[in-house]
Image (spheres, rainbow, N blue to C red):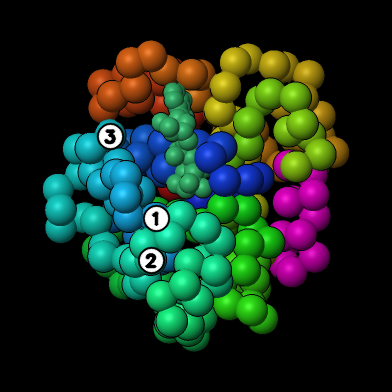
Amino acid sequence: MTRRFVIVGTDTGVGKTVVSAALVGALGAHYWKPVQSGLEDETDSQTVARLSGAPPARIIPEAWRLKLPASPHISARAEGVEIDPARLVPPDVEGPLVIETAGGVMVPLTDDVLTVEVLARWRLPVILVARTALGTINHSLLTIEALRRRDIPILGVAFVGDEEAAPQETIARKGSVKALGRLPRLDPLNEDTLRAAFAASFSLADFA
Ligand SMILES: Nc1ncnc2c1ncn2[C@@H]1O[C@H](COP(=O)(O)OP(=O)(O)OP(=O)(O)O)[C@@H](O)[C@H]1O
Ligand SMILES: [Mg+2]
């Protein structure tokens, strides 16, 4: 089994899918979004395919596709289904695999099971995606603490946003985590600009 990474965020909408797409492109990895809540807009799998150029064969189908854009346990209940966390098993694929979780690590998958509890079972290295903007120190350090107390390995933090040296340094130091790199706000955001931004700030050796 080769490299498998779990992309988690300090929150929803921080840039997990964009960071995932950058990694999938740079590593030639497979991508898996176990639980997709919200099917109206482009799904995360579709966004990753578009921004990474990965062929359909490298996008693993979601285990649960839920219509309502809400916390997975709420989206599932709205459709009269219940997510079975035991069935969330990272697939065996040839080459690296990037797994993107829903929302932040304390997001419930069922009334009883939190995302972080599934991460503890997997014990795969986690990449935390965090904003550089105000509020990130608190969100990032709380997330790191939640991962550490469950012995979930942390590969490092990927930042998204404008360069803010002080908060990035504080998170790395007080969280005892590696700052892997930073994606600036890209305009336009497309496969080419994303590939270039990732290459400019991240080191592939960190994902070896
Ligand atoms: N580096 C970037 N440059 C420009 N836009 C970005 C960048 N990173 C993220 N975005 C935009 O911010 C929004 C949220 O990003 P993204 O979908 O990656 O977040 P997420 O953490 O995956 O959210 P979710 O919890 O819904 O899965 C999207 O519209 C995305 O295009
Ligand atoms: Mg996403």
Which residue: 38% across, 14% down?
187
Q: Residue 112 lies in what quarter of the image?
A: bottom right
Q: Is residue 127 visible?
A: no
Residue holding disc 2: 66
> Percent x, y for residue 156?
62, 43
Callout 1: CB less than 8 Å from ligand 1: yes
Label 3 sits on a secondary structure element that is helix
Q: Amino acid at mark 1?
A: Gly
Callout 2: CB less than 8 Å from ligand 1: no
Residue neighbourhood size for the residue with mark 2, other residues' Cα within 10 Å, grouped as few (<14), some (14–19), many (≥20): many
Which residue: 56% across, 37% down?
14
Q: Are marks 1 and 2 in contact (CB under 8 Å)?
A: yes
Q: Amino acid at mark 2?
A: Leu
Using the numbered discs, state the Cα–Cα distance from disc 1 to disc 2 in whole angstroms: 6 Å
Label 1 sits on a secondary structure element that is loop
Residue holding disc 3: 51
Residue holding disc 1: 38
Classify residue 93 as left or right of residue 202: left
Residue range in magenta is 140-151
Q: Of label 2 and label 3, which has the lower sequence position?
A: 3
Q: Of label 1 and label 2, which has the lower sequence position?
A: 1
Using the numbered discs, state the Cα–Cα distance from disc 3 to disc 1 in whole angstroms: 19 Å
Which residue: 43% across, 60% down?
68
Q: Residue 41 lies in what quarter of the image?
A: top left
Which residue: 56% across, 28% down?
160
Q: Residue 108 lies in what quarter of the image?
A: bottom right
150 drawn magenta:
yes
